[in-house]
Image (cartoon, rainbow, N blue to C red):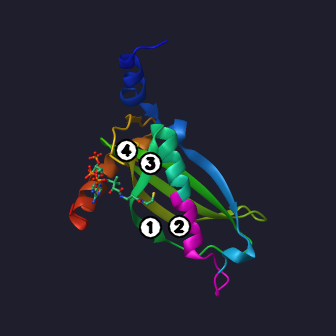
Amino acid sequence: MISYEQHFRRRYMTGRKVGESAVNDHIYEVFPNDLNAHNTVFGGAIMLEVDRLAGAVARRHSGEVCVTLSLDSLRFLEPAKSGEVLVFKVAVNRVWNTSMEIGVKVFAENIYNDFVRHVVSAYLTFVAIDSHNRPIKIRPVIPETKSENRRFQEADQRRQQRFKNNPRP
Ligand SMILES: CC(C)(COP(=O)(O)OP(=O)(O)OC[C@H]1O[C@@H](n2cnc3c(N)ncnc32)[C@H](O)[C@@H]1OP(=O)(O)O)[C@@H](O)C(=O)NCCC(=O)NCCS
């Protein structure tokens, strides 16, 4: 039996490492119904998977119900083609108070020659909410590797830009 203080500390104050919630190798096999008229992958199919996985990582990190506040900088760098496999990499970049930034990278992999191309990058902001849909505190995230630390630093600049582009009503 733990006290309320212990529960509170464990749930909201104790940080979790980026790697504890990250998705490193989510495979999405491209089927004919994912293709557009140009025989490349329909962007909306990738966006759906991006939002779904980012939400799963947000929930896994926070242990709370999380909703998408915004999706910015989703950039289709190159088209993904029929016959390729999509590989999603998703991680918490930074947590502020009730919101967090999730970064997503998508690669297109040709499984016959191992050729890999970076096709999409995206940043999403998720907010953790309580049963009344009110934002609640999220436990901190602990970056460990060099790239996790770089993303952690850069996330603050992106957040400032988000506030400028999309000020609170
Ligand atoms: C997400 C939601 C609960 C936030 O409610 P709210 O009253 O706007 O909350 P707040 O103003 O307190 O902001 C909550 C967090 O978002 C952040 N935020 C607000 N506007 C922001 C913006 N333009 N850019 C980045 N972060 C922003 C705030 O800074 C705060 O984070 P912090 O506590 O870490 O600083 C509410 O907007 C909502 O329900 N939106 C709909 C969500 C939805 O349906 N998503 C799609 C399906 S999942």
Q: Which of marks 3 and 2 is in front?
A: 3
Residue at screen point 51% across, 59% down: 51
- Label 1 to label 4: alpha-carbon separation: 18 Å
Q: Which of marks 3 and 4 is nearer the N terminus?
A: 3
Question: Is the CB–ligand 1 distance for label 3 below 8 Å?
Answer: yes
Please report contact status of discs 3 and 1: CB closer than 8 Å, yes or no. no
Q: Name the residue under label 2.
A: 47
- Crowd class of label 1 (few under 14; some 14 to 19; many from 20; radius 10 Å): some
Q: Mark 1 points at which residue?
A: 74
Q: In which quarter of the image is ligand 1?
A: bottom left
Q: Earlier in the sequence, mark 1 or mark 4?
A: 1
Question: Is the CB–ligand 1 distance for label 4 below 8 Å?
Answer: no
**134 and 103: which one is in front?**
134
Task: Give the x, y percent position of residue 127.
Answer: 37, 49
Instruction: State the SS at label 4.
Output: strand
Please report contact status of discs 3 and 2: CB closer than 8 Å, yes or no. no
Q: Which of marks 3 and 2 is nearer the N terminus?
A: 2
Q: What residue type is labelled 3?
A: Cys
Q: Nearer the viewer, mark 3 or mark 1?
A: 3
Q: Which of marks 2 and 1 is nearer the N terminus?
A: 2
Q: Give the range drawn in magenta.
A: 36-51
Instruction: State the SS at label 3.
Output: strand
Q: Mark 4 points at which residue?
A: 94
